[in-house]
Amino acid sequence: MSAEPNGMTYAELRDTLFALASRCNIIGFDFVEVNPQLDAGTGVTAYLGAHTVIEFMGRICDQPYWVERRERRVKKG
């Protein structure tokens, strides 16, 4: 996400990541280029960056593979 003309909005990025997580097995991802020092004092870039990562990780953890794995661990424990 960046302040580029005609760039993605937060909602577009979120919806894209959610669609990926619902259709693909995500095994890793990179989150790059957030510089809070250039955030004009609002902190919104760092906040949205952290929020994006947390939401995407939550969607990844809802994938069938991870749900099944958690359920197996609970049964063993």
Image (spheres, helix red, strand yellow):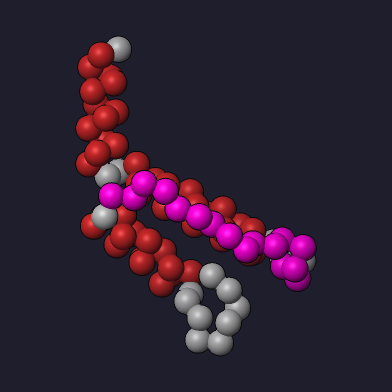
Task: Answer with left or right where residue 14 lies relative to residue 46.
Answer: left
- Could you tell me which residue is drawn at 25 percent across and 14 percent down? 76
Residue 16 picture quarter? bottom left
Count of labels in the image? 0
Region in magenta: 25-40
- Could you tell me which residue is drawn at 24 percent across and 26 percent down? 71
**In this view, 39 is above or below 70:** below
Relative image position of residue 27 (x, y in whole percent): 36, 46
Relative image position of residue 45 (x, y in whole percent): 63, 64
- Could you tell me which residue is drawn at 54 percent across and 57 percent down? 31
Q: Quadrant of the N terminus?
A: bottom right
Q: Is residue 34 in the magenta section?
A: yes
Residue 68 picture quarter? top left
Residue 17 appears in view:
yes
Residue 55 appears in view:
no
Q: Quadrant of the C terminus?
A: top left
Task: Answer with left or right where residue 16 lies relative to residue 44.
Answer: left
Farthest residue in the top direction?
77
Q: Main secondary structure of the magenta part?
A: loop
